[in-house]
Each structure stands twice: as C-alpha cells, then as structure tokens.
Amino acid sequence: MTAPTLTTEATTSGSGDLTLTVIVPAHNEEAGLPATLRSLRRQTVPPDQIIVVDDGSTDRTGEVARAHGATVLRPDRQLGSKARAQNHALPHCEGDLVLAVDADTVLAPDYVERLRPVFADPGVVIAAGNVQTRFTRTLWERGRSVEYLFGFHFQRPIQQGAASPMVCSGCCSTFRRDVLAASGGFPERTIVEDMDATWTWQIEGRRAVYVPEAVAWAADPESLVYLRRQVWRWMSGFFQNVRLHLIPMVRHKPMLALWVALAVLEILLAPLWWLTPVLLTTAWHVPLAYAALWWLASELPLLVGTLLYAARKRDIPLRRVLTNLPCLYPIRVVNTYYAWKAMLVELVLVPLGLAKTLTTYHKGR
C-alpha cells in the first residue's frame, strides 16, 4: 500500500522545468545550520535559491548562512514562529516550488530528485518524504527513532495508499508556490502550520503526497524538558486543527476524517491500555507478570514486524532498532499525558472561553 512512485518519462519531463526555492527558518541555529545547508548544496537536483530567515538570532546564524551561500533575511523584529518566518520569506521566493526545511534537518542527497516528480500532477500542492531521527544518543531520541520507524513505514504508507496523508511533515515539505501564495501563505492560525495546510488543501480537493523514497533526518529533543515542549505543541496543534477542520473534513474528505477519528480514539483509549495489566490482575486475578506479558504481546507482533521491515528498508542494524524499542514506552507516556491535556484544553476549555488556545511557539530542542 505504498504511495505510487511517479517515475515515468512523461512524469519526469512534466516536473523537470519546475524551479525550487528552499526556505530555512532559523533562530540561534549556528551549530546545526551548516549540516542543513551542506545537505541542500549536495542535492543531485540543486535548489535554485536558498533563503535563510534569521529570526532574531543572538548568535552567528546569519553569518553562518551567508558563509554557505544562502540569501539571509532578518526581520526587523523577532517573529517567534516558524510559519511567520516562512511567510516573511515567501515574497522573495522565485521558484515554482517552495521547500521548507527546519534548520536542524538534513536531507538525503536525492531528496529533491525523488520529491519533485510528484508535482508533474497539477493537483498535487504539497508533498513530503520519510522523516527519521538524526541522533540516537539519549533515551528520548532513541524512543523517537522507533516511533518514526513505525509511523513512516506503517501508518503513513496506508494513509498514502488511501490518498489521504494525515500530515506532510513541516521539517521537509515542498509546496506549490502559487497555491501557497493564493492561500495566504503558510497558515498562522494554528500552532502547527504543516498539518493545517495538509488538511486545508485536501478538504478543498487538492492532493497531498507522501514520498517514502525521499528521506530526511530531523534532530529530535534530547531531553525531557524539550520533548515536553515539542509534544505539547504538536498535540495542541492537532486538536486546534480538529476543532477547525473536522466538520468540513467529514463532508469533503471522509477518508482523512477516518484517520483523524482513529487518532482521537487511540488517545481516548490510551489510559485504558496503560491500565490493562492492573485491570487483569485486580478484576480477573491474573498474576501481574502474566498480565504484563499479555499486555506487551498484544502489540509486539505488528510493532516488531514493522520495525524489521523498516530496519531492512533503511539499512539500519536490527540490533540497534530492538535495543531502542524499550525507549518507545517513556515517549508514549509523554504523548498520552499531553494528548489528553491538549484535547481537554482545545476541545473543551477553549470553546467554553475558560482557556486560551496555544499560540506561543517553543522550539522543540
């Protein structure tokens, strides 16, 4: 059920004339930015323009960007969010396509080459590739690596097979510039512009595409402090979009609404899943060790099977993947807590006027 790859001669010729501008929003990224810019310069299909938005940095971000040949834009004041920084650069973009790349994300050398052909279809307005974790040094990075391997090799291909990806990842998404500009630029009304754009355009009847062969590596939170910030932002943004888009989505893009409904159901049932060993022990007097074993075994076949496939596909040592597997569960604890918190705030308290929606963008690392 993987996404169809557009590799025919006609497709290639249809997209070969499309020019590409890269936007890299950056705030105090002098350490990680060089690797990102080097990966852009090494593309087999080089971008026609690279713009770095130096959003109020107090370090050498702008100097580093200029040293790597990028055009640097520095707003008069700190904009404070990725979407606003990207919109600052949008009027300066000359390419037919706009590739938004986070300042701590590294692209595979053939990322643009593999992604650009899908835009031969005029209905495609946004596309992104397979995101993996750059570093696996801490428990949190290792857990996220497993989460990404599973999500991008099981959930995302199924969604693409049904022509309704849940999100084109904002760290490496490509947009059709004219559509983006006509829509008012990168959405600023929610805290996660990538999901907002992906849902909005699919509801309008346009196409979003996941390209599994195009690979990017993102730097993920290395500590619990930064992980909490990132997950709170992601979960708040998800439910902001649920509040904003669910009704028109049910009417105009029911398959996408199904994925959203399943995601919400998973969040609702997550506490019950965590309590299953306790319930088995207290209600049915199953020994706790057996209850915990059954609890894990109920999901391990699908999880491990997908990870085996993903490890082979990505040429990652299987031992490393299996060693990182236990680190997934602390990540899930954080996900569950902030998903429930965001659901209550954004779907209950905000509509009742008892809380304010999240608008402050905190960096995830």
Image: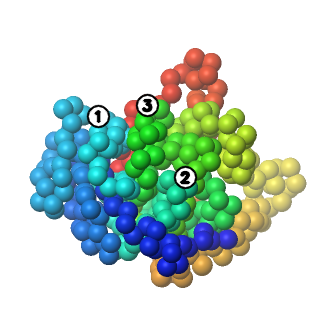
Could you tell me residue 335's position as x and y percent? 56, 48
Secondary structure at badge 1 equals: loop
Left-right relation of 311 to 344: left
Task: Name which residue type carries label 1.
Answer: Leu
For label 3, the residue is 359
Where is 214 relative to 144, above or below? below
Q: Taking the image as drawn, is residue 219 in sight?
A: no
Q: Nearer the viewer, mark 1 or mark 3?
A: 1
Secondary structure at badge 2 equals: loop
- Mark linked to residue 167: 2
Disc 3 to disc 2, how far (Cα)? 20 Å
Image point (58%, 50%), residue name = 206
Q: Tell me if mark 1 has few (under 14), some (14-19) or many (20+) residues whose alpha carbon lies within 10 angstroms of its own.
A: some
Image point (52%, 70%), residue name = 212
Disc 1 to disc 3, how far (Cα)? 12 Å
For label 1, the residue is 79
Q: Nearer the viewer, mark 3 or mark 2?
A: 2
**Mark found first going from the N terminus, 3 or 2:** 2
Q: Is residue 155 or residue 221 the one in the foreground?
A: 155
- Mark linked to residue 48: none
**Mark found first going from the N terminus, 1 or 3:** 1
Could you tell me residue 294's position as x and y percent? 77, 65
Left-right relation of 232 to 246: left
Task: Name which residue type carries label 3.
Answer: Thr
Image point (43%, 31%), residue name = 359
Disc 2 to disc 1, how far (Cα)? 24 Å
Q: Tell me if mark 3 has few (under 14), some (14-19) or many (20+) residues whose alpha carbon lies within 10 angstroms of its own.
A: some
